[in-house]
Image (cartoon, rainbow, N blue to C red):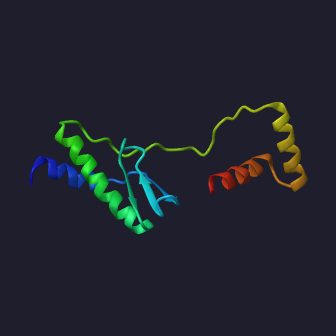
Amino acid sequence: MSSIEEKLNEFMHDAYRFYLTENADKKGYDIVYPDLPGCTSFGSSADEALKNGDAARKEWARAILETGKELPKPCEKEYSGQFRLRLPKSLHKRLAQRAQEEGTSLNQLCIHILSQLNSK
């Protein structure tokens, strides 16, 4: 097995993050690998998009290796679950008042609001 083929096999076993989104205009699903610039694909179903995404990822990696460049490693960043946020005093006040009205903490209210926005 050639060095490129060995590297491709190793690469295909690595877990890279991807976004699978419905594309109403094309009547199917787009798949994008944000850690692999330009690596995208499409499928008429989610399963087909995932399958096509694997093929696109392999060809993307082959093209990189054939130029003599190294393949990027999957993002392994750890997140603590905490971050600081600066916001206007008026917004802070409205959120604190709403949390009090709902009988919850400001932290839980913000988690709820962000989770709702993130699920869209």
Residue at 72% from the left image edge and 54% from the top image edge: 112
Give percent across and percent down for residue 14: 32, 53
Relative to 101, say whether 80 is above or below. above
Residue at 89% from the left image edge and 45% from the top image edge: 97
Q: Nearer the viewer, residue 99 or 64?
A: 64
Residue at 24% from the left image edge and 38% from the top image edge: 70
Residue at 67% from the left image edge and 35% from the top image edge: 84
Relative to 88, say whether 60 is above or below. below
Quadrant housing residue 82:
top right
Quadrant in which the N terminus is drawn: bottom left
- What is the tally of numbered marks visible in this picture? 0
Q: Which of 43 and 10 is in front in this view?
A: 43
Give percent across and percent down for residue 81: 60, 46
Quadrant housing residue 37:
top left
Question: Farthest front residue?
Answer: 25
17 left or right of 51 in image: right
Give percent across and percent down for residue 86: 72, 31
Relative to 29, say whether 39 is above or below. above
